[in-house]
Amino acid sequence: MQLGGQRGSDNVEDRRGIGVGGGLGIGGVVIAIIAAFLGLDPTQVLDTVNQVAPPQESRRDVPKGAPADEMGQFVSKVLGSTEDVWTEVFRANGQQYRPPTLVLYTQQVRSACGMGQAAMGPFYCPGDTKLYIDLSFYDDLRKRFRAPGDFAQAYVVAHEVGHHVQNQLGIMAKLDSLRGRVSKSEYNSASVRIELQADCFAGVWAHHAAGKSLLEAGDVEEGLNAASAIGDDRLQKQAQGYVVPESFTHGSSAQRVRWFKRGMQSGRMNDCDTLNTRDL
Ligand SMILES: [Zn+2]
């Protein structure tokens, strides 16, 4: 990417190296890790873990604003770019974008959705409108998932921001209202539609970022490769050697690539209607 001229966002909380106070019981850690490998809905995982370890106050003040280190600068610039793009897209629809906060942490973090664990990967919490990333996930992305490149890293941020956009549009609330009212497999298929829309929204961001000359040769391929690498079928095959489509919560590799691509080609939110399409 070409982020030299991009402003960094100040909507960053740097909680790296800051303890959470108390700490997780071993049961919580085990539940979170197993659930992440099985591809369960992370918000459900968080609910479960929260019951194991009730929230306590953090003991130190959290530095706010764009961090000075290289990776901190990178993610704050990507976040700044999502703010610029979504502000414009919302304005064009007569709406006002309210940007989320990005929380950087190490190993575990408290959120309004419960305890977050690095092993779960990056997540968005609608309850506090914050996205949470342990930057060690980028090592996993590069090595375990074989998706290297700075644009692959930016796509991860853009996907979580996509959930924030959904939250602001009231779409996350719809998914939440299904919980407990529908069967597990019905809930999973709704979750897949939500996740594919977040991929499509990440593509919408990429479309406009390209228009601002933030992309360089090879970036699009990096993004598509990453979308493919974190498909449920690919992850399940790696983890357990076989694929169970009814348990998908994020969509197959082919679907994730397709919707990311669609958003990237059109740059329009309206082309990301994964919730109603018959052709997922
Ligand atoms: Zn997601």
Image (cartoon, grey):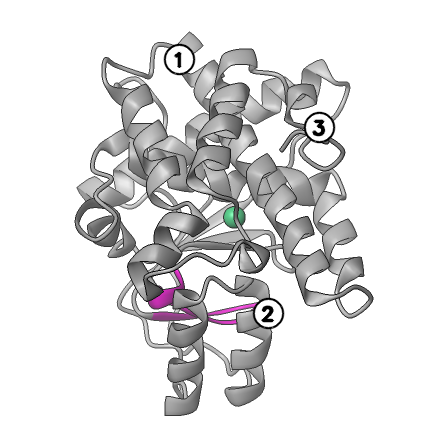
Labels 3 and 2: the sequence-earlier one? 2
**Callout in the foreground (1, 2):** 2
Q: Is residue 78 left or right of residue 272?
A: left
Task: Quickly name the residue at label 3.
Answer: 96
- Asked if disc 1 is less than 8 Å from ligand 1, the answer is no
For the question of whether residue 77 can be seen, the reply is yes
Residue receiving disc 1: 210
Q: Amino acid at mark 2?
A: Gln
Q: Is residue 161 left or right of residue 26?
A: right
Residue 2 to residue 80: above or below: above
Mark 3, Cα crowd under 10 Å, few <14 / some 14-19 / many 20+, is: some
Say what secondary structure mark 3 lies in: loop
Magenta residues (range): 108-121
x, y (%) of residue 16? 29, 62
Per the model, the C-alpha gap separating discs 1 and 2 is 35 Å
Q: Which residue is denoted by mark 2 in the rendering?
A: 44
Q: Position of residue 186 (x, y in %)?
A: 72, 57
Helix, strand or loop status at disc 1: helix
Identify the mark nearer the N-term, 1 or 2: 2
Which residue is drawn at the image coordinates 33% and 37% (left, top)? 226
Q: Please name the residue shown 30% across and 65% down the image.
A: 106
The answer, for residue 10, to whether it is visible in the render is no
**Residue 30 is covered by the magenta coloring:** no
Residue 193 vertical position relative to residue 128 in the rendered view, above or below: above
- Kindly state the secondary structure of the residue where label 2 is placed: helix
The foreground one among 100 and 151 is: 151
Vertical side of 20 occupied by 232: above or below: above
Give the label, 3 or 2, closer to the camera: 2
Residue 30 image position (x, y, % from top left):
38, 83
Residue positioned 76% across, 43% down in the render: 170
Q: Residues within 10 Å of mark 2 (few under 14, many from 20)?
A: some
Q: Position of residue 54 (x, y in %)?
A: 55, 86
